[in-house]
Amino acid sequence: MHTNMTILLKVISGSRAYGLATATSDTDLKGVFAASRNGIFGLSYPQQINEDNNNSVMYEIGRFTELCLKNNPTALELLATPSDCILEKHPLFTSLTPEIFLSKRCEDTFAGYAASQIKKARGLNKKIVNPMSGERKSLLDFCYILSAHHSVRLVDFLAQNQWKQEECGLVSIDHCSNLYALYHSPDALFSGILRGDDSNDVALSSVPKDCPIVAYLSFNKDGYSRYCKDWKEYQQWLSLRNEERYHSTIEHGKNYDAKNMMHVFRLLEMAYEIATEGTINVRRNNREELLAIRSGKYTYEDLLSMADEKIISIHDAFQRSDLPDEPNAGEVEQLLIDLRVNVYSL
């Protein structure tokens, strides 16, 4: 931790604050600090400090206030942390309360973020249900030979003729996108169908006028581009996925990230409470219901249907809510100024 900073708030956050901790839950710490006087008056100061693989995150008060003005869920939750999870709280920090920040922006930041996580869950579902093979497909797998009223896979066509792709040449057909005349010669006359395993397009060759066309080749370029994009995303997911959560997903057999979906419903419920009660309830009163989602009790389709219903009710609630459209930035800025003045006068 940096020296000469003043700790304004330090809390236990995450599942333990939500009342959703299990035997394997980590203890996450978050907080707010005021940077040193020299840092604020000088050229630079840290706006955020992450430690212990992001299990400990501290926000400088200026950055924290900005996040609260944007109705960022993580920041607002810190202001409403249950008392049994507060480790340190400076007397000056009591001037900042959730109520001065709550606004109709919360529909987007809480419910909107939850909706984005549903999309993320859909993507995870796709990756789990449709795993991509360990060996990356070649561009040749997206090429086809026209044959009467149907097509033949290029790799099969080459195998049937005992030809190598390096022995072939392609010439583009005028006015026909991704359609080529295919030539063959065992004498290394041509450039091949592709120049390398990482090629993004077929190769073209110079062909003698008397060389006969042996076939016409169609390259599904759009399909290959989509495949490359999906392959890259899948490999990134494999390298970054949380193995414990992945195997938990496999074990409950429902093919979705159940922990992620649990937090989707937690955020949706909090959004509805903000709209109807004007308050943030960090500690959840339906632990068993939320943990049932985490355990894989519901089907993926049922959860999506339930979430859609909640999103509609949240929108209606915010339409009727007396909350302001956005927080009073001028009032909040003055509170921040007063807090800094008092911190640095100590």
Image (spheres, rainbow, N blue to C red):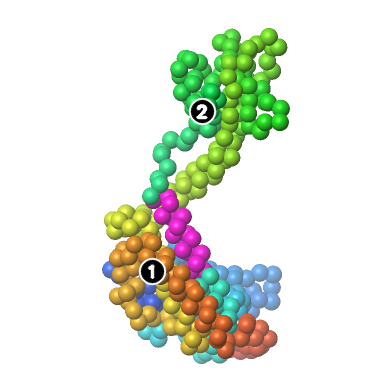
Image position, residue 212 (x, y; %): 63, 12
Q: Secondary structure at mark 2?
A: strand
Image position, residue 3 (x, y; %): 54, 73
Disc 1: which residue: 262
Which of 224/80 is in front?
224
Name the residue rendered at 49%, 21% in the picture. Answer: 157
Cα separation between marks 1 and 2: 49 Å
As shown in the figure, which amino acid type bears the numbered disc 2? His
Point out the stretch of residues depicted in magenta: 113-128
Viewer-nearest of labels 1 and 2?
Answer: 2
Name the residue rendered at 62%, 16% in the picture. Answer: 213
Mark number displayed over residue 235: none
Q: Judge whether 304 appears above or below 251 on screen.
A: below
Residue 125 lies in magenta, yes or no? yes
Of the residues under marks 1 and 2, which one precedes in the sequence?
2
Mark number displayed over residue 150: 2
Which of 198/309 is in front?
309
